[in-house]
Amino acid sequence: MKVLISISVFSFLMQICPPVMANVFNTVVSVQCNECVSSDDYRVAAISALRDREQKVVNVVNFNEFDVRKFDVKKLQVEVCSDYSKSATKGFCRMEDGSIVKPLKLTNIAREQFILFAEELYQIDFFQPVNISVDYQVAGSAWELIGSGYLPNKVSDTWRQQSEYSDLVNRYKHGMQVSYQTRIFVTNLSPKIVYRFSDESQFNSEVDMIDMDEQLHYKFIALQDEHNNFLDMAEDPIFTLGDKFQFESQQSEDYMVMKKVVEAYGFMTESKATPSGIAVTIVACTSSDNPCQYSAF
């Protein structure tokens, strides 16, 4: 039965990921988006899989829904300025998405073969979520990990000492074996991993790779906190002028941590009182009041 599945899934790969000749850049990429629901979700996932000005065929796979959608994507970020006579650092320019995304048809046979691949991963509990509690003595907030050269590694090293870590290693190794056997390579194939902090903030993460010593390496992909602030770490840059956040007060620890991080990236925060706390907007540093003493990461 496993041989039959492997043959069937290999056939699926040939249909959604046609082979390329040697010395030619691969023009197909497959990405996992188990949270995709709407057509726009799939479109955004397809665009996010590429760097600016790249053009590739992108397969967006949703293992939760046993669904796969195929797109021809040309990613293009365009700078739009409301006043070309003024500096972009004053907030008059912004980046807008000018990408072209064309849905491509996937055959019923290819879709059914993908389902066989997904079923094999579910049989080994590959997608069982992992929740990791971070000791406040290591890091008290997810915000502290942004721009830090050592804290993400320290958090991961602490997690490696817990008993559940070896279970995740075994599941991931088994999942990679399925991937290699079927020759289906999803760039971010990983269970959902959530690092939770004492201030109720969290980092959604995924396994980036496993090294020769069988140690897992993680990629922190999205920050969320108790104030419903969200920061997409896949964006480049992660902060832009005009970004808005909500906090309890200027004295709250999470706000002060976030403020330092923003300043380290070469911006300032501008706060305004609201009935529920403060509304924070990212603005450019000024020569008259410049707390941005750090070099941007």
Image (tube, rainbow, N blue to C red):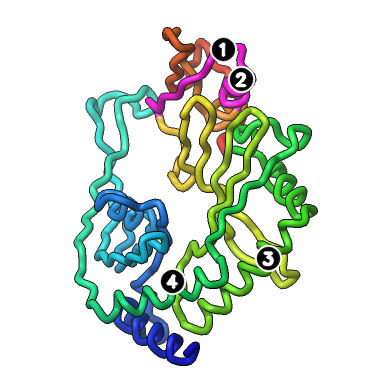
Give 24 or 154, whichever is nearer the viewer: 154
Q: Position of residue 35 (x, y in %)?
A: 40, 51
How far apart marks 2 and 4 lie (CA) works out to: 44 Å
In the rendered view, does 185 fall on the left or right side of 100?
Answer: right
Q: Which residue is mark 2?
A: 256
* For marks 2 and 1 on the same chain, the one whose residue lies earlier in the sequence: 1
**In the image, residue 114 above or below residue 209:** below
As shown in the figure, which amino acid type bears the numbered disc 3? Val
Of circles 3 and 4, the one toward us is: 4
As shown in the figure, which amino acid type bears the numbered disc 2? Met
How far apart marks 2 and 3 lie (CA) works out to: 36 Å
> Is label 2 in contact with label 1 (beta carbons under 8 Å)?
yes
Give 40 or 241, whichever is nearer the viewer: 40
At a point 58% along the width and 33% down the height, the residue shown is: 201
Mark 2: few/some/many CA within 10 Å (<14, 14-19, 20+): some
Q: Which residues are magenta?
A: 241-260
Q: Position of residue 257 (x, y in %)?
A: 62, 25
How far apart marks 4 and 1 lie (CA) works out to: 47 Å
Q: Which residue is mark 3?
A: 169
* For marks 1 and 3 on the same chain, the one whose residue lies earlier in the sequence: 3
Quarter of image, res 13? bottom left
Q: Secondary structure at mark 4?
A: helix
Quarter of image, res 23? bottom left
How far apart marks 2 and 1 lie (CA) works out to: 7 Å
Q: Which residue is mark 4?
A: 118
